[in-house]
Amino acid sequence: MTTMNAEDDDLAAGDDLGDPNERRSQWQDVLTAFRAPTIPIVEPWSISIATLIGSAYKVPSIASKALAQLDRVGALRLTSEAITFDTDDVEWNKLSTVRCRPAGEVLADSAVRREIDSVRKVLPPIPGRKWVVNRLADGVSQVATIALERVGGLNSRRAIATELEYRGGLGRRRSTESGVVVSALLAVVPDLNDVVLRMAQQHGARIEGYS
């Protein structure tokens, strides 16, 4: 069993996220650097909270393993064959419906807190965990706040893809929903939401809640 060591305790004890305004500017720069893929999608495209944290902060070596645990959490992946919300892979040709909701609804403070708590539970007690948890909480909050600013606040009616309904094994209907991070990324990365909806439509999926 892996346990925390003194080095990790020292790392967390001296942890300082820095000036709030500088952090906001830093996160805005990180998000601005991402571009949505073009259609047809030739190369796999992905973005995750782990990637964003790695871009926004200098990751100490002791925290690298803990950060890697988040690779498939708060993640969106697109290929020519499938779309992935966090850990759920859905083949485009099995996708039947994409449901959309207003960005202001899915990025509320209560949803952000739930997302942070749920992702925190994914991380095992390994060295670097506290460092990653601190950046995780800051990162999810920053991404959601910046996304809300971009779409016009909590009252925004801009619709983004939040649920994928698809045909599972034996033809059973299944669905997966986006978390706060994926929803925020769909709202903040230019054209990303449109790419998802267009790919879905090209494969015969129905779009609900979008106009």
Image (cartoon, grey):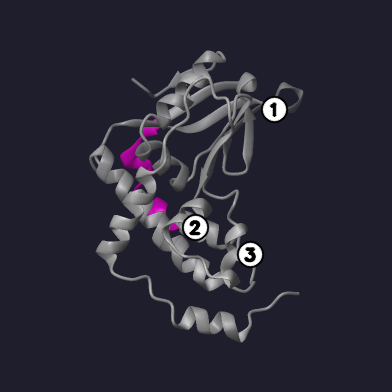
Give x and y (percent) for residue 206: 50, 17
Q: How many angstroms separate mark 1 from mark 2 (CA)?
A: 34 Å
Give x and y (percent) for residue 152: 23, 39
Using the image, determine if residue 83 lies above or below residue 150.
above
Displayed quadrant of residue 129? bottom right
Tag shown at residue 65: 3
Give the labeled residue for mark 1: 168
Give x and y (percent) for residue 5: 63, 83
The residue segment tinted magenta is 101-113
Give the labeled residue for mark 2: 54
Few, some or many residues within 10 Å of mark 1 (<14, 14–19, 20+):
some
61 vs 95, nearest the viewer: 61
Dominant SS of magenta comes to helix
Tag shown at residue 103: none
Q: Residue visible at 50% across and 66% down? A: 133
- Report helix, strand or loop for mark 3: helix
Left or right side of 63 for 151: left
- Report helix, strand or loop for mark 1: loop
Q: Residue visible at 53% across and 19% down? A: 40
Displayed quadrant of residue 157? top left
- Report helix, strand or loop for mark 2: helix
Q: How many angstroms separate mark 3 from mark 2 (CA)?
A: 12 Å
Q: Amino acid at mark 1?
A: Gly
- Which badge, 3 or 1, comes first in the chain's sequence? 3
Left or right side of 71 for 13: left
User: Which mark lies nearer to you, 1 or 2?
Assistant: 2
Give x and y (percent) for residue 51: 51, 51
Q: Amino acid at mark 2?
A: Gly
- Which badge, 1 or 2, comes first in the chain's sequence? 2
